Image (spheres, rainbow, N blue to C red):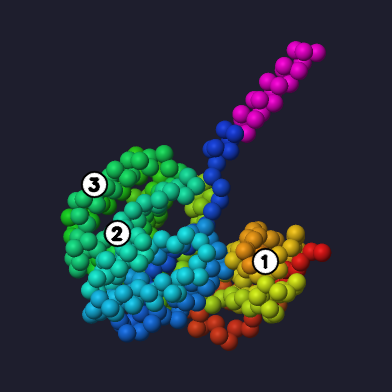
Amino acid sequence: MKRRKMELKRIIFSLLFFVVIVSLGFSQQFNFVVFGDNRPFNNEDPQPQIFKEIVQNVEWIHPDFVVDVGDLIYGYGADAQRTRQEYMDFLNVVKIFSMPFYTVVGNHDVAGIGGQKYYETLLKKTLYYSFDYEKSHFVILDTNVNFPNGKFTQKQYNWLVKDLNSATSAQNIFFFMHKPLHEYQDYSQNAWADKFMAKKVDDLITHFNSKHHNIRMVFQGHEHLYWRTEFNGIIYMITGGTGASLAEEPQNGGFYHFVLVTVNGTHVKTNVLLPGYFSVKYLNSNSGTSDKVMVVVENHLPSVYEGLSVKGLKFVMPEASSYKVSGNIPCKIWEITRNSDGTADVWVEANLDFNSLSVKSVFKAALSALILHKIPNISSFENISRLTQDIITVSVSH
């Protein structure tokens, strides 16, 4: 009997050990959003309206964090007072983000008087840095040192070598920079003025990946379009369509967009999304006094999302022991935050997939997807009828 108990304990311990080892070997799936070049058209205009829409869309999606690849403000020709005001205008737009927000310095950001100082002090960011999330490593580079030549200094290069050597065991490495190492074919002379350092950094990235095989993607900006290509087994993407004037026709990548990145272990998936395809409208009081709050999610083109979930539906409710959520699309409460004023923020996750597979809805979705593939610009869809109008309700449980 005693021997049997000992054997049972040994089996239980082995199982627990196995579970721990297995759990350490796998990363939790996470999402992040990348966009760039949201700057206004000049140093007098406010932040573009399309950028404000994208920020709101991203907040509704609620990824784990967001990265802006630069040109946050216009900068050029601005005195110190105006440069500071441009940064304050930018911060006033992105203050709605309830997730970590990382920035990359762009050439416009350091072009105005005091630009670099305000970038570092107001955004509380250094010019280049790195961070880790789950088992992935994220590298933010500065391609605009010694403006306007975009010189990449030897000091930053030495830092990059050291930083990469500390990330050899990372499951994934992602790079972010403003001026692209690999450019859209029509702008091959537009980015790094220092071609020697460009090649040196490119060779470093390529050599490191040939040895460790964990650099997945390099996100870039500066060119006002969307473009994706592959060099030496690494995906290079330009995502510069968040507000600045577009550089190409829609079929060549000239459309406003943001990129949703999903990481699951070493598998990385990107989904290019356009602003304005879904909106959220609260139907009744959301001040924390109503026992029942409803929201309408208007989804114009659900077919393009491939199962997109939004987690940023925020219901401000009276404080209660529990809450319940219901809707005509899959939804659930994913987080509750208790506030000091007797209210609670009830965050709801909802899936924007079809809730009906009627012939009519499938036909409309196919037509929408076909048009989207050819001309990915939200203005092209104004006359397409809305596909879904879903209602989600959060109520206090008594």
Q: Residue at x 54, y 53 (%)?
A: 30
Q: CA distance from mark 2 to mark 1?
A: 41 Å
Horizontal side of residue 55 vs 145, given as left or right: right
Question: Which span of residues is magenta-colored?
Answer: 1-19
Front: mark 2 or 3:
2
- Closer to the N terminus: mark 2 or mark 3? 2
Give the vertical position of 42 relative to 55 (above or below): below
Q: Can residue 227 be seen?
A: no
User: Picture coordinates of residue 379 (x, y %)?
Assistant: 50, 83
| Residue type at numbered disc 2 | Leu
Disc 2: which residue? 127
Q: Residue at x 25, y 79 (%)?
A: 78
Mark 3: secondary structure: helix
- Closer to the N terminus: mark 2 or mark 1? 2
Tag on residue 158? 3
Horizontal side of residue 42 vs 393, given as left or right: left
Give the vertical position of 322 relative to 14 (above or below): below
Q: CA distance from mark 2 to mark 3?
A: 15 Å
Disc 1: which residue? 342
| Residue type at numbered disc 3 | Asn
Neighbourhood count class around disc 3 (C-alpha, 10 Å): few under 14, some 14–19, many 20 upward:
few
* Residue at the extreme front: 341
Front: mark 1 or 3:
1
